[in-house]
Image (cartoon, rainbow, N blue to C red):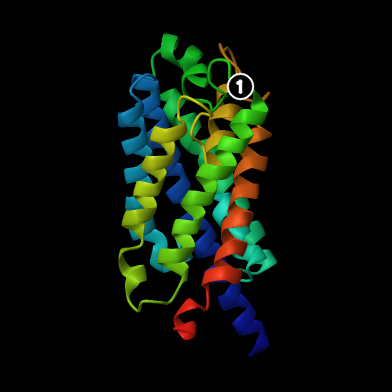
Amino acid sequence: MGDENQTVDQAQLMRKALAECIAVFIFVFSGCLCAASDPKEIFAIAMAFGLAIMVMAFDFGPVSGGHINPAVSWAMLITRNQDAISFCAYVVAQLIGAFLGALCGRMCLGADLNEKFVGMVATNPGHEITPVQALVVEIITTFSLVFTVFCTAVDPNPEGRGSYAAIPIGFAVVMGILASGNISGGSMNPARSFGPAVAGAIGKHAGDGLSNLWVYFLGPLLGASIAGLTWQHAFKERKSDV
């Protein structure tokens, strides 16, 4: 009986990880192709990423929770809403999905755009913006996104709120990219930065997405940590206090 339960648990975890992989694949593929078509169209890019998150969260929320972001998974872990094994499986799946999504997006482009892919879609600090300044921006925008996740998708109050949580979460992504896309690159998601940086560094390429990659891991993870812990310790029990 114990072996059967373990097999079921493993199968469920694999299904959840696959859901995360597919969701991040679509998220990165959609957003990066939009960015590659015209890197200056910040509104279109923000909508592409935000709508992809919204749709994928609706699709896979009932399966995996629809994290679609290692920073969200990290916040779930430190607030004890996810166990360590699931966290590791989710993050690996998210990074793989991001890499494959970026790679497929790059392969869909012509030779000239293919070579310039990483320069157009990788997240880097904007003109005259230092990595530290970009780091601060990523902390704040990721806080906004992850706090929205906790307030709408994780918090049980009010009852039924989670059924439409994907909508404000998607718009939080749009808001964050519109605010920071030209400043920090508007990542808020380590997988979103990882996939294009690695896929874009393969073969002949113009541009660099790897040098500042640490900003887009550290910033979102710090922002997500602050958001998750703030919700847990300041707002989680608010309904019972009324």
Q: Position of residue 241 (x, y in %)?
A: 49, 83
Residue 42: which quarter of the image? top left
Question: Label 1 sits on what residue type?
Answer: Ala
Q: Position of residue 199 (x, y in %)?
A: 56, 28
Q: Give the quadrant of the C terminus.
A: bottom left
Q: Residues within 10 Å of mark 1 (few under 14, many from 20)?
A: some
Q: Give the quadrant of the N terminus.
A: bottom right
Say which residue appears at 46% left-offset and 19% top-offset.
Answer: 120
Q: Depth check: 104 or 233 in front?
A: 233
Q: Position of residue 110 (x, y in %)?
A: 39, 14
Q: Depth check: 5 or 192 in front?
A: 192
Residue 123: which quarter of the image? top right
User: Please, what secondary structure does the residue beneath circle 1 have?
Assistant: loop
Residue tagged 1:
201
Answer above or below: position of 16 versus 102: below
Q: Depth check: 222 or 33 in front?
A: 222
Residue furthest out toward the front: 242
